[in-house]
Image (spheres, rainbow, N blue to C red):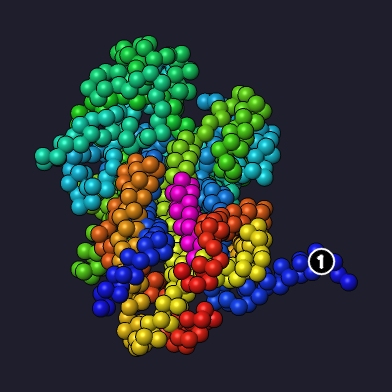
């Protein structure tokens, strides 16, 4: 009888039930999408922030000073890292957070414009660590470098000339440039807006040859997806207890990734480039905080809206309740019927809403960030639980009033 | 004697008021839904306009976004420095930097930079500085430079072209970049010692990309001999992140506002439909379809106005709270949004009465009154 009552109620008033279910589904969809966005936005924006370039730098351990004013490196810092150690960076704990890396070897060369600094680097080189292959270099690490002409390949003798230097030397893409008595083809002119505009960039092996230091690297710039640092991140790992140290090591703080880089590259010192790392941390936490607060507001809004729709739907059924009461239904079974109906509606609406919301989040992620938002399966019970709570809260007063009211008045339409 | 028309008008308003009084609860539910939708729309629109500026301010912390440099081998005159600062004034901060390679007592080469330390501090908030120089002849040492030159924080001397300066370390600066290898002194000390003029102005300009472009254009035209360039590293990252955040915000706002609006639709449709018996009685007493439609529309308009006013105030409160909690600065209320919010409320409430009214029009009053 109970099941039949509920079933009939759905069968007899499909339009009204649909309206409420749609309201619940919409609320659930927005909640699902917003929670998914709030949970994933940090990762997405963090990856977008990599357009700011490297946030970590690995230098040789030795204490020496860079004597560089503007684009002219008067005395490149002594001490070198070993090029053969580079692929090991892809073997650290947070290897998947390393989005790009580029070695840099400065060497001064003689040109028609006097002594200029040449930077040796990878442009887009294929490296291998274990059985994992990855391609990386300056093009990924410094995405704001703009090249007019073409990027040289990593095993060619071609070079890029900075915008300001090119103007002084009067070279264009395709011309030749004499360095230390050797002629090299210029494959492009590049602009960065920084000191590099007055320098030359060449494949790493060429710089090593010019410097007479095979296998040497001066600095390694690493671009890593990190978590904004907090007080815990700033603690020194050596001062932490074993459990805390593990937690520190296994959080993608700039400090812990730097620590791990230092572990794999022998005789090195790794640290964050504060200008990028610190500021991107602030930007990231602002955006994350904003989305979190908006999600809270969205949950609250859709909750209230669904509750209002539910309350109205319940008010409409006073007569039905009056009739059932007149026929002798007790308070408990009556409430049970309506509560069951609400829960059923919440489940149906919640399920449909979750599906719709996941698709929404996916589409949004793909359109804006180029990769879908990850919707955690654990969200499903959360969203359905929220939907049940909201529909229940919305209908509770209405049910109680309907059940308590005098059936005669309800039937006369006066309640 | 009042005219019939005036009486009719009074009656109309009395009916409106009585309808709200008699069905307090369901009217309240409908009002709640409208208020929530209006508040959500207000808060999201307010945030959407304001977040751009708030985030742009965060990006100004990345330091200079425009650099003006004298051609190699030359320096900027005092006049040039002053007029660049005047050109930038009000739209940002312009800080001069002068560089020289000096030698320490142990003949170690080191780059010394002279600058307005107070301004450099504002320009580069990410510098981790242990203590800023307070008096003259105090220097700020990069951490690498400090380890080599003054490991025990003892005073040291530097030589530049035969001239000597005695400096005491005030503190260290740590940035993870070139600054770590340099020594910073005040411009006054630097010029008295080396006699060199600044060669670079670092400018942190505020505002949108268009405003920055026009600032650059102005500098370019005023100083054709100097190299004026945008620091593209930050500009590109900023545009990228801001654009994507705004898109996400816009999409989320659309979701939220649409849901709230649809819920208003559902609530109001149910509300009007629920009162079919009242309308049937009105119709049976001789009210025309037009009068009933007018009556319902009037109700919807009152609801929309009340909802818009309450929701607008609530929404501004929510936006201000989010601004304070997240950006530590309130979001300025945009009162010019109110007409749009009111119009949106009217459209939603009026359109949600259309469907039930059309259904009612088709039905004979007798059928409803019989309860069919």
Q: Chain of mark 1?
A: B
Q: Could you tell me which secondary element the residue under label 1 belongs to?
A: helix
Which residue is more in the foreground, A196 or B43? B43
Dot 1, crowdedness within 10 Å: few (<14), some or many (≥20)?
Answer: few
Which residue is more in the foreground, A17 or A52? A17
User: What x and y, as percent, mark residue B141?
Assistant: 45, 50
Q: Is residue B36 left or right of residue A369?
A: right
- The quadrant the N terminus of chain A occupies is bottom left
Q: Which residues are magenta?
A: B245-270
Q: Is residue B197 left or right of residue A303?
A: right
Which residue is more in the foreground, A132 or A367? A367
Which residue is more in the foreground, A263 or A11? A11
Is residue B363 placed above or below A399 in the rendered structure?
above
In percent of the image, x 58 and y 68: which residue is there? Answer: B280
Q: Is residue B55 magenta?
A: no
In percent of the image, x 57 and y 50: which residue is there? Answer: B49
Give the residue pinned by disc 1: B4
In percent of the image, x 65 and y 40: which residue is there? Answer: B88
């Amino acid at each position: 009888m109970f099941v039949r009552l509920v079933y009939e109620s759905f069968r007899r008033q499909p339009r009204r039930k649909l309206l409420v279910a749609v309201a619940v589904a919409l609320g659930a969809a927005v909640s699902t999408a917003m929670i998914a966005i709030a949970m994933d936005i940090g990762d997405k924006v963090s990856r977008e922030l990599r357009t700011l370039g490297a946030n970590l730098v690995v230098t040789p351990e030795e204490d020496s000073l860079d004597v560089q004013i503007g684009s002219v490196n008067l005395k490149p810092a002594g001490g070198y890292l070993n090029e053969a150690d580079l692929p090991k960076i892809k073997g650290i704990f947070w290897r998947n957070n390393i989005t790009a890396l580029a070695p840099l070897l400065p060497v001064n060369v003689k040109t028609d414009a006097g002594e200029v600094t040449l930077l040796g680097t990878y442009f887009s080189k294929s490296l291998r660590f274990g059985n994992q292959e990855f391609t990386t270099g300056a093009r990924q690490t410094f995405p704001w470098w703009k090249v007019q002409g073409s990027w040289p390949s990593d095993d060619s003798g071609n070079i890029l000339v900075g915008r300001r230097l090119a103007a002084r030397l009067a070279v264009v893409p395709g011309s030749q440039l004499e360095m230390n008595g050797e002629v090299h083809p210029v494959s492009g002119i590049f602009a960065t807006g920084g000191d590099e505009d007055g320098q030359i960039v060449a494949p790493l092996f060429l710089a090593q040859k010019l410097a007479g230091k095979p296998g040497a690297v001066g600095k390694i710039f690493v671009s890593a997806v990190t978590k904004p640092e907090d007080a815990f991140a700033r603690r020194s790992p050596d001062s932490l207890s074993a459990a805390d140290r593990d937690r520190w090591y296994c959080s993608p703080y700039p400090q812990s990734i730097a620590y791990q880089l230092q572990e794999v590259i022998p005789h090195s010192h790794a640290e964050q480039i504060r200008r990028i790392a610190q500021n991107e941390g602030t930007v990231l936490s602002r955006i994350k905080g904003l989305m979190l607060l908006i999600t809270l507001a969205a949950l609250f809004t859709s909750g209230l809206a669904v509750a209002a729709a539910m309350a109205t739907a319940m008010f409409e059924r006073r007569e039905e309740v009056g009739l059932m009461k007149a026929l002798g239904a007790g308070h408990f079974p009556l409430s049970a019927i309506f509560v069951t109906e609400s829960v059923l509606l919440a489940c149906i609406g919640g399920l449909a809403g979750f599906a719709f919301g996941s698709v929404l989040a996916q589409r949004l992620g793909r359109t804006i960030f180029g990769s879908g938002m990850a919707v955690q399966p654990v969200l499903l019970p959360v969203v359905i639980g929220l939907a049940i709570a909201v529909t229940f809260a919305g209908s509770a007063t209405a049910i109680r009033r309907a059940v308590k009211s005098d059936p005669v008045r309800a039937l006369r339409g006066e309640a | 004697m009042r005219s019939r028309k005036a009486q009719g008008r009074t009656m109309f308003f009395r009916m409106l008021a009585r309808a709200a009084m008699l069905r307090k609860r369901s009217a309240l539910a409908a009002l709640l839904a409208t208020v929530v939708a209006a508040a959500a729309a207000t808060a999201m629109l307010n945030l959407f306009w304001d977040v751009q500026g708030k985030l742009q301010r965060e990006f100004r912390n990345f330091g200079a976004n425009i650099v003006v440099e004298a051609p190699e081998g030359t320096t900027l005159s005092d006049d040039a420095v002053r007029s660049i600062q005047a050109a930038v004034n009000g739209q940002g901060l312009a800080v001069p930097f002068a560089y020289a390679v000096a030698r320490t007592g142990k003949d170690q080469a080191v780059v010394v930079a002279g600058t307005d330390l107070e301004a450099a501090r504002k320009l580069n908030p990410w510098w981790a500085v242990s203590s800023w120089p307070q008096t003259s002849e105090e220097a700020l040492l990069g951490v690498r430079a400090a380890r080599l030159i003054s490991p025990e924080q003892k005073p040291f001397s530097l030589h530049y072209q035969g001239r000597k300066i005695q400096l005491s370390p005030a503190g260290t600066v740590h940035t993870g970049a070139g600054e770590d290898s340099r020594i910073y002194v005040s411009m006054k000390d630097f010029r008295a010692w080396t006699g060199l003029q600044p060669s670079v102005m670092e400018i942190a300009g505020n505002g949108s990309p268009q405003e920055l472009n026009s600032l650059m254009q102005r500098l370019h035209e005023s100083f054709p001999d100097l190299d004026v360039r945008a620091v593209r590293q930050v500009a590109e990252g900023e545009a990228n992140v801001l654009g994507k955040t705004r898109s996400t915000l816009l999409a989320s706002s659309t979701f939220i506002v649409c849901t709230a609006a649809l819920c208003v639709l559902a609530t109001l449709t149910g509300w009007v439909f629920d009162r079919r018996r009242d309308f049937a009685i009105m119709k049976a007493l001789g009210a025309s379809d037009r009068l009933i439609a007018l009556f319902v529309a009037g109700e919807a308009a009152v609801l929309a106005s009340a909802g818009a006013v309450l929701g607008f105030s609530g929404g501004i409160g929510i936006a201000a709270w989010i601004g304070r909690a997240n950006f530590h600065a309130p979001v300025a209320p945009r009162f010019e949004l109110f007409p749009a919010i009111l119009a949106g409320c009217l459209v939603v409430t009026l359109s949600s009465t259309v469907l039930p009214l059309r259904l009612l029009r088709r039905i004979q009053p007798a059928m409803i009154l019989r309860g069919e």
